[in-house]
Amino acid sequence: MIVRGPGAVHNGPTPSKEPPPMLTADLSKLLTLRHLRVIATLADLKLVARVAEALNLSQPAISKQIAELERLVGTPLVTRERNRLFLTPIGARLAVHAQQVLSQLDRAAFDIEAMATGITGSVSIGVVSSVAPILLPAALTLFKRGAPTASVTITEGHFTALYPQFEAGQIDLLIARTWQPQELPGVRQSVLMRDAVVVVAGRDHPLGLRETLQWADVTDWPWLLPQSTSVALNAVEAHFARLGLPLPTNTIASVSLSLNLALMRAMPVLGLFPKSLAQTHVARGDIVVLPLETDGLLSEARSFWHTRGPETNNTLALFLRCLDQAAAERNTIPNG
């Protein structure tokens, strides 16, 4: 059971001024998991019919749960406009707490089940560097809590370099950003996340002061680009071609995020960073994000594994579940 969604944001009509809430003294004792599931799912789906379908309940049952919640809290939690429901500010806050509680319960059940398996095997993972720091820390934390004596081997690279190892069975699981994904014989794949790629530069780069930019303004600057044999470079070349521009010729081929950050501090070079990582380094004052639209370039990350892999390797099966759990938790957080 995973409650998915971007969290509750009041995006409907502004309700009339609400009276001060008269909270029931023992609210925490009276709220049920069904109450929490209803308000959390409502924050995501907004339609009673969709909430009822998602929770396998009738629409009158959903309406009853909402009415009970409002009676317990002592103030309106939703406003109605035609057939849509919008959370009031108090409803939105309650939905955030409900999602957090349900997520913790999910994680507790996952941990207990994982520990009960007693898995002690090994799993080898190939991953591209632009995805590794976003998903692997949470997935590995879950995995090692459930299987502390299992071993994990991680190899970083780009898809084209890692795929032969995956094909030969040297890597059990491959995680990569995709461009024009296609079916692969004997291979299962799953979309883990969508995380936009943005153009970045060092904080002192002259272009960092520009409020507007065109792609034609950046082609003559030095660039950090993916390696020549990578799928990522093919995607970047196609992006420049769609814009009617040549690929920059003053380039450094590097897949190391730490090296790229150091180079951006040392010289006026431009690069591509996952948006979620870029936001972290912008907050630290390391880089700036340039105002250029990347049109979904390399935004999708997928996992790849051999069809029978989880059947023959329990450790891989557990790690896949940990990876899905980490991706789901990441996707329920606003702004990733």
Image: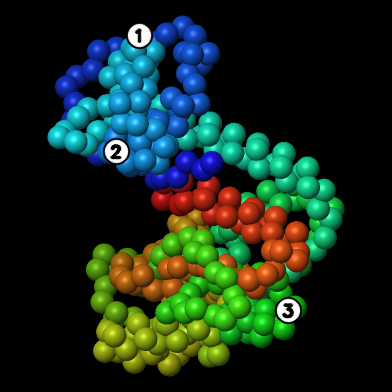
Q: Residue at x 25, y 33 (%)?
A: 86
Task: Provide the secondary structure element on which disc 3 rests.
Answer: loop
Choose top left, top right, bottom left or bottom right for residue 12.
top left
Around disc 3, counting alpha carbons within 10 Å, would you say few (fewer than 14), some (14 to 19), or many (20 or more)? Answer: some
The residue that mark 2 highlights is 49
Can you tell which of label 2 and label 1 is closer to the viewer?
2
Q: CA distance from mark 3 to mark 1?
A: 62 Å
Q: Is residue 94 above or below residue 322?
A: above
Q: Position of residue 314 (x, y in %)?
A: 75, 59
Q: Is residue 209 above or below residue 163?
A: above
Can you tell which of label 3 and label 1 is closer to the viewer?
3
Name the quarter where the N terminus is drawn. top right
Q: Please state which of residues 193 and 284 is positioned toward the viewer in this rendering.
A: 193
The amino acid beneath tag 3 is Gly
Q: Is residue 217 above or below residue 103?
A: below
Q: Residue at x 34, y 85 (%)?
A: 240
Q: Residue at x 77, y 44 (%)?
A: 115
The residue that mark 3 highlights is 169
Task: Provide the secondary structure element on which disc 2 rests.
Answer: helix
Which of marks 1 and 2 precedes in the sequence?
1
Around disc 1, counting alpha carbons within 10 Å, would you say few (fewer than 14), some (14 to 19), or many (20 or more)? Answer: few
The residue that mark 1 highlights is 22
Q: Please state which of residues 275 and 222 is positioned toward the viewer in this rendering.
A: 275
Q: Residue at x 40, y 87 (%)?
A: 237
